[in-house]
Image (cartoon, rainbow, N blue to C red):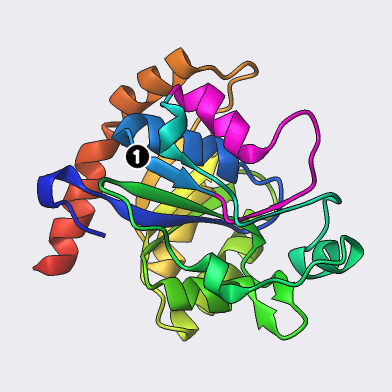
């Protein structure tokens, strides 16, 4: 990731599916006015994750990069692709070249298979961008998050920081930082009806951009 001219590029990963990656991606896309790319979309409900980000972040359509693959069923990409009788071409998963900041959102958790012999975390390693790991605030997060951090560290994937998503917990964020040594970027609050205005308010209250710049500078020193 670079802060040259305020350009940021990183990957949003989660400790599980439905952990809030798309919401947190919207948060960063709006705050940084960045490009957004979700290369693999598994399952089409009322709208895709790209459409959700466009609506929540209120960025121009040009900032939303088209998915490489959209599969019908909300399943692990390897199986969803097989059901749709599609073969994943890894050339299509190369990082897009953009003039500006870029947020990449992964599909599912780190160990989700993209094909029968290639995991999501393998693709993250190839992209060679730092990771922001999204985890829940509630019971179970310590085990899931510390295991995810261990998997990333084992592959020498840079972890920029954690975003703890959900109702405030008095101990879990501190325990995660204490055991992992990974900095906490934000405790993202639970809000029943999230909208673009709320994202703006939270971004400013948490001073998120300055935290990102500070984290990057600390890694250089």
How many numbered marks are there?
1
Task: Judge whether residue 45 is colored magenta.
Answer: yes
Quarter containing the C terminus: bottom left
218, 48: nearer the viewer: 48
- Residue 132 image position (x, y, % from top left): 43, 56
Q: Which residues are magenta?
A: 38-58
Residue 20: which quarter of the image?
A: top right
Work out whether residue 195 can be spotted: yes
Task: Judge whether residue 81 is colored magenta.
Answer: no
Q: Residue at x 17, y 50 (%)?
A: 214
- Residue 91 image position (x, y, % from top left): 54, 73
Q: Residue at x 71, y 45 (%)?
A: 18
Residue identified by numbered label 1: 34
Quarter containing the N terminus: bottom left
Residue 107: which quarter of the image?
A: bottom right
- Residue 50 image position (x, y, % from top left): 58, 38
Q: Residue at x 64, y 73 (%)?
A: 89
Residue 121 versus residue 83 in the image, above or below: below
SS at circle 1: loop
**Side of 172 where 72 appears, left or right:** right
**Side of 19 where 98 appears, left or right:** left
């Amino acid at each position: 990731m670079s802060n040259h001219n305020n350009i940021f590029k990183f990957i949003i990963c989660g400790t599980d599916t439905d952990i809030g990656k798309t919401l947190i991606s919207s948060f960063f896309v709006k705050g940084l006015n960045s490009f957004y790319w979700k290369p693999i979309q598994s399952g089409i409900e009322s709208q895709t994750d790209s459409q959700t980000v466009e609506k929540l972040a209120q960025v121009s359509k040009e900032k939303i990069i088209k998915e490489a693959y959209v599969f019908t069923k909300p399943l692990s990409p390897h199986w969803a692709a097989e059901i749709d009788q599609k073969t994943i071409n890894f050339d299509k998963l190369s990082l897009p070249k953009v003039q500006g900041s870029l947020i990449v959102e992964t599909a599912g958790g780190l160990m989700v298979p993209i094909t029968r012999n290639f995991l999501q975390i393998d693709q993250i390693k190839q992209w060679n961008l730092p990771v922001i790991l999204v985890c829940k605030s509630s019971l179970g997060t310590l085990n899931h998050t510390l295991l995810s951090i261990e998997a990333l560290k084992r592959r020498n994937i840079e972890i920029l920081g954690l975003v703890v998503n959900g109702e405030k917990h008095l101990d879990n964020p501190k325990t995660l930082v204490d055991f992992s040594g990974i900095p906490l970027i934000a405790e993202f609050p639970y809000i029943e009806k999230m909208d673009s205005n709320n994202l703006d308010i939270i971004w400013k209250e948490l001073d998120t951009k300055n935290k990102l710049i500070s984290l990057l500078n600390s890694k250089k020193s």
